[in-house]
Image (tube, rainbow, N blue to C red):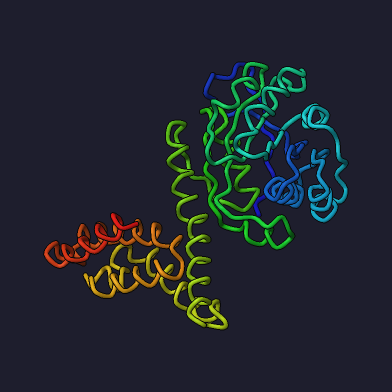
Amino acid sequence: MSAPLRSRPAARHRAADAPLVFPRTLTVGVIGAGRVGTVLGAALAAAGHRVVAAAGSSGAARARMALLLPQTPTRSAAAVARAATDLLVVAVPDDALAGVVAGLAEAGALRPGQVIAHTSGAHGLAVLAPAAAAGARPLALHPAMTFTGTPDDLARLAGISYGVTAPAELRAFAARLVADLGGVPEWVAEGDRPLYHAALAHGANHLVTLVNEAVDRLRDAGVDRPEKVLAPLLRAALENALRLGDDALTGPVSRGDAGTVRRHLERLAATAPESVPPYLALARRTADRAVAAGRLRPADAAPLLDVLDGMEVAA
């Protein structure tokens, strides 16, 4: 990780978009001792910053704090906000974020000049408007990584991307903060936050669902260790997709094998009918991408699409 933020002499008059000056060692508080908040708090502490308080009331949160932030006292959210004189990290669920921020502002727990950074991928700066009205400086800082809330996560932070939305005067601070965490900033415009987050959720969360669907269907087929069968195949498919894009497509849909796809769907309908709609949706999207990439001729796609349309009606 890089050295912590360094101070610079303050100019007598700072332009509105000039970088702000912060102390070398930040005084930090964390609200939301979930998987993300505790790990980022531990990473900031490892980078030399002072994590002085954290908020988390559940048994799981207290256990994570004992493991990752053993020297950090547990306080109420308002007390954490008051103690975090330089940086307040708010790592709560997306739908809870607005209420937490509004509550802190109403309680008078925020101070002018303090940076309040949330870790939501879906939200930008607008959700922090009550904090900004209180004089705090808003920052959206989303780590593009899945977390377990264990020390293993700290090693995974090296080199990951952070989706950052920041006012002009905070961009230098945000870049250095991400560097302290061992990551790389990806600047995301305010209006693009939902699309940015949708892409990550579609790629990562739905991947977990898709893999577990495949595991279940292999078990239905009598395979004792489906994870052993899938691991090398899925790793190769992922690596090829990231490297080659749509040129990595293989399988019956990309070849236009309508008969094979029909047999897939018939057996799925008999064994696991809940798997038919996602198979149909993904097969249709795969066919569209294969045609657009020149991997599948429209004439060869037609019988396949007829099969998909017929099963969709039947479903």
Q: In the image shown, does 259 or 172 lie closer to the viewer?
A: 259
Residue drawn at (44%, 48%) of the image? 199
Give the percent coordinates (x, y) of residue 224: 57, 83
Q: In the image shown, does 178 or 116 lie closer to the viewer?
A: 116
Question: Can you tell which quarter of the image residue 294 is in?
Answer: bottom left
Residue drawn at (51%, 82%) of the image? 222
Q: Residue furthest left?
A: 299
Residue drawn at (31%, 72%) of the image? 250
Judge whether 10 appears above or below 279 on screen: above
Q: Is residue 19 left or right of residue 259?
A: right
Marker count (numbered): 0
Give the percent coordinates (x, y) of residue 69: 82, 50
Question: Can you tell which quarter of the image residue 85 is in?
Answer: top right
**The N terminus, quarter of image:** bottom right
Question: Can you tell which quarter of the image residue 94 is in?
Answer: top right
Q: In the image shown, does 94 or 263 lie closer to the viewer?
A: 263
Give the percent coordinates (x, y) of residue 203: 46, 55
Residue drawn at (68%, 36%) of the image? 90
Judge whether 240 appears above or below 102 on screen: below
Q: In the image shown, does 6 or 136 lie closer to the viewer?
A: 136
**The C terminus, quarter of image:** bottom left
Judge whether 261 appears above or below 41 on screen: below
Give the percent coordinates (x, y) of residue 266: 34, 70
